[in-house]
Amino acid sequence: ASIFDGVEKGAPIEVFALNKAFLEDTCSDKVNLGVGAYRTEEGKPWVLPVVKKAEKAVVDDATLNHEYLPVLGLDTYAAAATGLLLGEDSLQIKNKNAFGIQTLSGTGALRLGAEFLAIVMGRRTFYYSDPTWENHQKVFLSAGFTDGHYYRYWDPQLRGIDFDGLISDLKKAPEGSVIILHACAHNPTGCDPTKEQWVKIADVIEEKKLFPFFDSAYQGFASGDPVHDAFAVRYFVERGFELFCAQSFAKNFGLYNERIGNLTVVQRNPATTAAIQSRMTLLVRFMYSNPPAFGGRIVGKVLNNAELRQEWMESIKTMSSRIIKMRSLLRGELEKLGTPGTWEHITNQIGMFSYTGLNEEQVKIMIEKYHIYLLASGRINMCGLNEKNVKYVANAIYESIL
Ligand code: PMP
């Protein structure tokens, strides 16, 4: 007998289970549209050339060692990350109203921010879009929040945002609720609010005294332009909101397994910096003590060097352009086949993911009959497409809808 005999299995994590099923599938036509990572036209992961260069420079730098980093991370890196988010000329940075904390990728930034809000600030209520990235609820609940609600987001009829629903749900949120907002490239729908809609969202958040917590996992990766992708966060900051923003460098630097992220804190008064940093320090200390160095050194080196940064800007263009091209090829093929329904949403959506509008039954056909793997929600990763398989995928969508 073991003390662990009574331990029951937890629910499987859909995206990992799907990936496993894909790897075990022996069909030569199989297509993986499930993974949450960039793939080249050849279906391979991509190490950005500028990342390779920075890695080499870090390894060869004789002044570096493996001493512990400060609990809140490398400050040159965190400042560069916050600068990328808010703009190097941001007034909030200049006035010391914004600072960054190095975290264990985007998830770690969400968790740290949520722990701060729950444990230090006593917040219990949070709102997330319906649907949202599946981890949002779990991370907030694990951090001490107890009261999670969705706000309406996806309208299946419209294949776009249910904006009236969103606004009316936010209006019902009690004062002090934390509102999780996708900074850009909404996961899983690929639908972002327009600039005019962001203004209205900000109006409600201000009026109802809610707390905006942005999740920025795709800056620069979505449109190819990091300034464009930071519009919503910068707009809120310029309007004077205090907020948190979780940043991930998994996608835009291809540094998935280095777990490199940042929590940007924006406050109204620099006098609160010391207390916030001290409480964050304790939260990190009790969780994982201090962060790893390698990813922060790479991203810091690239962002803080004009030449390397320029090279990075070109790489994010390469990635985003490939995704945009796949969107237009897929839509073109679907329309050529006369697939029932409308398909503009495929090219209107932004980022790696697309909500196709396929239902669970149709997804089942895609997987079982065509060996094309996608989430039950109908979400596909555009990066799984290439010029060779897009016709096959379009045809399978056509067949599974009929
Ligand atoms: N937020 C969203 C919306 C995401 O899509 C992701 C990546 N799937 C993350 C956060 C965090 O990812 P990571 O922890 O790997 O940075």
Image (spheres, helix red, strand yellow):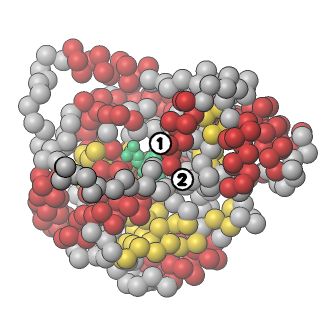
State whether residue 366 appears in this view: yes
Residue at image location 10% in from the left, 36% down from the top: 68
Residue 190 coordinates in the image, percent (x, y): 61, 52
For mark 2, give the secondary structure.
Answer: loop
Compared across the picture, whether 171 is left or right of 386 comes to left
Q: Nearer the viewer, residue 329 or 396?
A: 396
Packing grade of label 2 (10 A; few <14, some 14-19, many >=20) is: many
For mark 1, give the secondary structure.
Answer: helix
Residue 157 coordinates in the image, percent (x, y): 76, 66
Residue 211 coordinates in the image, percent (x, y): 37, 72
In the displayed structure, would residue 106 be above or below residue 159? Answer: above
Residue at image location 39% in from the left, 40% down from the top: 249
Which residue position is annotated with label 2? 187
As drawn, the label of residue 126 is none
Q: CA distance from mark 1 to mark 2?
A: 16 Å
Residue type pointed to by label 2: Asn
Image label count? 2
State whether residue 117 appears in this view: no
Which residue position is annotated with label 1? 16
Residue 272 image-quadrant placement = bottom left
Residue at image location 31% in from the left, 39% down from the top: 259
Q: Nearer the viewer, residue 231 or 321?
A: 321
Residue type pointed to by label 1: Phe
Compared across the picture, whether 356 is left or right of 74 comes to right
Residue at image location 68% in from the left, 22% down from the top: 28
In the displayed structure, would residue 165 be above or below residue 225? Answer: below
